[in-house]
Image (cartoon, rainbow, N blue to C red):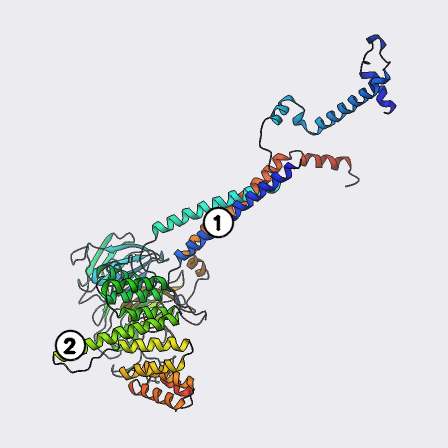
Amino acid sequence: MAEKPSRMNRTRAVLTAVIVILALLLVGLAVVFFKLLTPSGLPTVSSSPTTMQWVRSMYGFGPAADEQLLSPSSVAIAPSGNIYATDPVRARIMVFRPDGIFLRLLHTGGGGMGKGQFIRPESIAIDRNGDVYIADSWAKKIIVFDRNDKYLREWPVDQQARGVYVADGKVYVLDVGHVIVFDAQGARLSAFGTRGRKPGQIDAYQGIAARAGHIYIADSYNQRLEAFDESGTLLWAVPDKTTASSLIDTNTSGDGSGSRALPGHRWDLPQDLAFDGRGRLLVIDAFMFRIAVVDPETGKVSATYGEYGAEDGQFYYPTSIAYDARRDWVAVADTQNNRVQIVRIPDTAALPVSALWRAAASPYRYLAIPALVLLLAIAFAMWAARQIRSAENPDEGSEQGEEQERNPEDA
Amino acid sequence: MPDSHDESLEDNAAPLGEPAGNIGQVDPAWAGVLDELAARSQVSESSAAEDPETETPEAESAAEAPAHPPLEPVSAWLLKVALALIVVLLATTLTLVIFLVTLHKAPRTEIERAVSSAEMSVREHPSVAENWAQLAYAYARAHRYDDALNVVRKGRAQTHQDYLYLAEADILRSAGRFKDSIAVYGSAEAAISQADTQAISARKTMGIYVPLDDTTLARVYVGRAISERQLGEAKSAIADLEKAVAIAPDQSTILVRLGDYYAESGDTSKAAGMYRSALLYLPDYAPAKAGLERIGRGQ
């Protein structure tokens, strides 16, 4: 009889030791996993809700120079959340998943100017179906691929395809000094604008966006923003100046409230625009190294985010911007830093579930798999224990019933 | 024994030593033995009723066979927990393997890119000392100080460039090993001074009398000064910074640092002089303005 307790104690001790070792192994594995998931050199992210938050940077698909982006000029986000970034010097486009993992290259075999090829993808836009519209500045055309990179169609522009934007079934192309509006098949619908410095004239790089019949231009070389209707009528120009020599807008005429909401703000080289979830314009200024938030009704700047630098979270001549409404974050082609950055700026969200989508795009989501398996294992163990217990004591339930029948008064 | 037992014995047992015809008459000598046998048979009956396994011959043979005894409840639970942990371990390992297979080697941060670019440069051009230095600095930025030191020493052995002492000293300082860094800064100073002297005499031989513009030595003095200050050696730090300013008098960063050290040592007039000198070269230099404000000499 004395042997039985000692055998039980030995069994318990062995099992406990095994559990401790397994738990230590699991912790060690989790630490390794976490270290692999966490890149080295993470920037210090401010915890203030009023500042720009760096999410991640994408440099390419390998360590070699030709496996990385070189001066990416444009960025666009597909409905799936995939991020497309142009690599114009190498005539290709890199496609990344929302979690930053490289997916594939979109290219036409080294580039060319023939049908089905592109040579200098300067700007890209993606429609609701995931079709990719590429403005090829050297081949002077718009070329379209579907979401599976299959060539669909192409059509020529007038002088140079600098910028492209797709909205409401229309394709808005920024040519030299003017805008051309096509339908999705490439049929020309309208055109307006002339090159120059006066309000209403255009001398832009690639920044064009459109919504609800209004067309917005980042008039880069005139250092201003402009808004037109589809007939080409100027709605506003900020700053409203007749020459480009003045850098600071001092015009307070017009509606009496002035053309600046952020005192002292000046445009240096506004390059691209995108709409956020609340319908505001996000404008990237390459020479100010910042993202500006602009009211599309008035052109007034309400806030700016970002700073110059090479570290993650900083910009160096950024030239393109795109917004992901589902994940509530902004993709920026950080051109001179040869990367695409994902950042978040405050108050851009329209969808309340964006945090869930962001979590689903986080690299740390892989850790959920072992956690889920652990929960399932615990649930299974509890279920198995219950099954074993009821098998060991089949009469337990019936005995209790009989006891109650015998002594109903006690009950 | 009570009378009831005698009655049961008379009913059930033939008296020993007596012919069958004498049933009912028990030899008193055997009464105690019979009582004992009856008691034992009652005990075995009751234990058979409680433990059916020992009742049947099959159960008895099973009990006799060397079977594993059933686990007591605590051990059973521990076994289940152990099995659950094994399952989780396997799942985690599988997830890790899948993740590693899909993970590409592209950098994810600027520091990772600096490291990967520098590694490629060293691999492609191992004879260039600057590549080794850049790789070492990249490792140091990633807080991989041991790797950084290994690289810089390997680079020095491979390229025989003594100026890599400076990179080694900088890395030791970044790692917080200030005393070690001061010693290596000394080696760097000696190596660079010697190299500069040779360069100057070579230029003279060629008839070139333009002074050598080498701020590397200034970097040595600045680095050493920072380490000395960390160790509380303020006078040595100031002396080294003064040497650095003598070599590179137009470097506002060095002037401001010297101004800060003067201010810490209590010499505010010299500090103000340094800050104002810095502003001569960079009129909007914020640290210089802040320095003047701190010592109360700002406008």
The reply to whether the C-beta atoms of the residues labelled 2 and 1 are less than 8 Å apart is no
Residue type at mark 2 is Ala
Percent of width and height locating residue B82 = 52, 44
Work out whether residue A100 can be spotted: yes
Query: Residue A243, relative to residue A347: is it above or below?
Result: below
> Looking at the image, is A36 positioned above or below residue A265?
above
Would you name the residue on which mark 1 appears?
Answer: A372
Residue shown at 74% from the left, 36% from the top: A403
Which corner quadrant holds the N terminus of chain A? top right
Name the amino acid, label 1: Leu
* The quarter of the displayed image where residue B208 is located: bottom left
**Chain at tag 2:** B
Question: Circle 2 sits in a helix, a strand or a loop, which is it?
Answer: helix
- Name the quadrant containing residue A58: bottom left
**What residue would you read off at disc 2?**
B202
Observer-nearest residue: A28 or A43? A28
Among all residues in the image, which is located at the extreme left? B206
Q: Position of residue B65 (x, y in %)?
A: 59, 26
Q: Nearer the viewer, residue B228 or A369?
A: B228
Question: Which label was assigned to residue A71?
Answer: none
Which residue is found at the position 32% from the left and 73% from the top?
A: B185
Q: Is residue A248 above or below residue B38?
A: below
State the residue at coordinates (20%, 70%).
Answer: A176
x%, y% of residue B105? 31, 56
- Chain of the residue displaying label 1: A
Front: mark 2 or 1: 2
Q: Is residue B293 left or right of residue A144?
A: right
> Relative to the observer, which residue lies in front, A45 or B116?
B116
In the image, residue A348 above or below residue B91: below
